[in-house]
Image: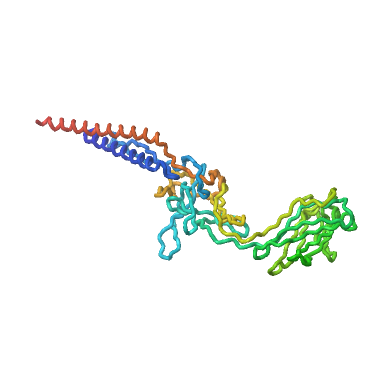
Amino acid sequence: MSLFNSLATAVSGMNAQGRAIANISDNVANSQTTGYKRLDTNFEDMVVNAGTSRFTGGVVANTVATNDVQGTISQVDNPLAMAISGRGFFSVARPIASASGETDFDSRAMFTRAGDFRMNSEGYLQNGSGDVLQGWPVDPATGRPDATRLSPIRIDRAGLPPEPTEAVTLSANLPAGAATGARGSTQAQVYDQLGNLHPLDLGWTRGADDNSWTLAVTRPAPGGGQAAELGTFTVNFGTNGAPAGTIGEVLDGAGNTVGRFDPANPANALLNVTGNFGGTDQAIDIDLGRFGSTQGVTQYGGAAYELRSVSRDGGPAGAFASVSTQADGKVVVNYDNGESRTVAQVPVVSFADPDALERLDGQAFAATQEAGRQQVSAIGANGTGTLQAGAVEGANVDIAAEFSKLIVAQRAYSANTKLVTTADELLQETVNLKR
């Protein structure tokens, strides 16, 4: 090996250690960057082959990613922030300039662990690097996510229209020992098409048959006038093979069968009434519980009518109040009337070799052939990580470890400079041989 080769080898050592110091500098500079993944350095020996002879050729420094190394997760006061504990990445889309006025997105698929999302002025969930969170859109009718596609999550701040009441559910016990003509009643509150509340009376009267009660559904008139009757029904207990004290049959006012106990076809005792509550006619189901079951209305021993619970669906108009995320990845919009709607669900994207992803600015990554095919899964499925709402993942950088590596790299760099000066002195001595 010649002195010139020694110079080249020492220079390669300086370059390699310089790259290591550059990686350390990057790590220290981003030690407080959300979702940052540090860069380590791997040194590789280079050998020059010349026929049967082998000469050292120096060293080369390779940068090693740590994309699958977990950072510290911390709770924050941002309800939209999310952190993945375990494998996987968030799918994000990067906004690009648009002449149309609408937000356009880069066509490349991008991924990140930076979950410090907030809602921007256009309603998109955007992290500190400007990337927009993508998720599965949820069908508002069924509440089910469409797992076949990913799209940028955008929150609609529009208000929630009122929902008229469609069903009233009653749970009560009618006293089995009550005398003929004994009464019991419950008043429910129902919403009309404009979101206004109206009273609805459910009045029970004991019939001549020990196991028969008459239910009258009426709407009290405003101002105390004559109540409007919406429907009258006869409810028989313990008939058609139903257990004693449970609903066996329901008849309407004309004596027609509304429903009855059938062990092969379990069903609820639903009574349909129609009334005008200030707008158009409104159909409401009165749910008395399942035929032959203790769920809902029963007739057991007791001295008086006993109301267990009464509930109804529907609600008034609501204005947008807030948006939040849940541990299962659901993005929920909340309204000031107490209602909420799930608008999207956040999945996790995983790769066979996440360290082979292409590194982009803003703590983002792009897919590569070496990383393998992306797999989009629900939170916690297929070995992916779990989600922590209201939290962020910090950088996986240990400052103390980085400074330790910096000291070693600095000393190695200095040692290589000594080799350069030593080789230079030896070459000078060789030149001096001529004198």
Q: Residue 123 in the image: state x and y as whole percent.
A: 50, 58
The one of 374 and 38 positioned closer to us in this rendering: 38
| Farthest residue, direction front | 223
On screen, residue 129 versus residue 224, left or right, reads left
Q: Residue 429 in the image: state x and y as whole percent.
A: 15, 30
Which residue is at 40% across, 36% downward? 399
Q: Residue 195 in the image: state x and y as whole percent.
A: 65, 63
Q: Quadrant of residue 282?
A: bottom right
The scheme the figure's colours follow is rainbow
Whether residue 322 appears in this view of the structure is: yes
On screen, residue 224 versus residue 244, left or right, reads left
Which residue is at 14% across, 33% downward? 431
Q: Quadrant of the N terminus?
A: top left
| Farthest residue, direction left | 435
On screen, residue 131 versus residue 245, left or right, reads left
Whether residue 146 appears in this view of the structure is: no
Which residue is at 84% across, 56% downward? 183
Q: Quadrant of residue 21?
A: top left
Q: Residue 7 in the image: state x and y as whole percent.
A: 23, 35
| Farthest residue, direction bottom | 280
The one of 217 and 351 positioned closer to us in this rendering: 217
Q: Quadrant of the C terminus?
A: top left
Report the number of numbered marks. Answer: 0
On screen, residue 158 versus residue 259, left or right, reads left
The one of 318 and 68 positioned closer to us in this rendering: 318
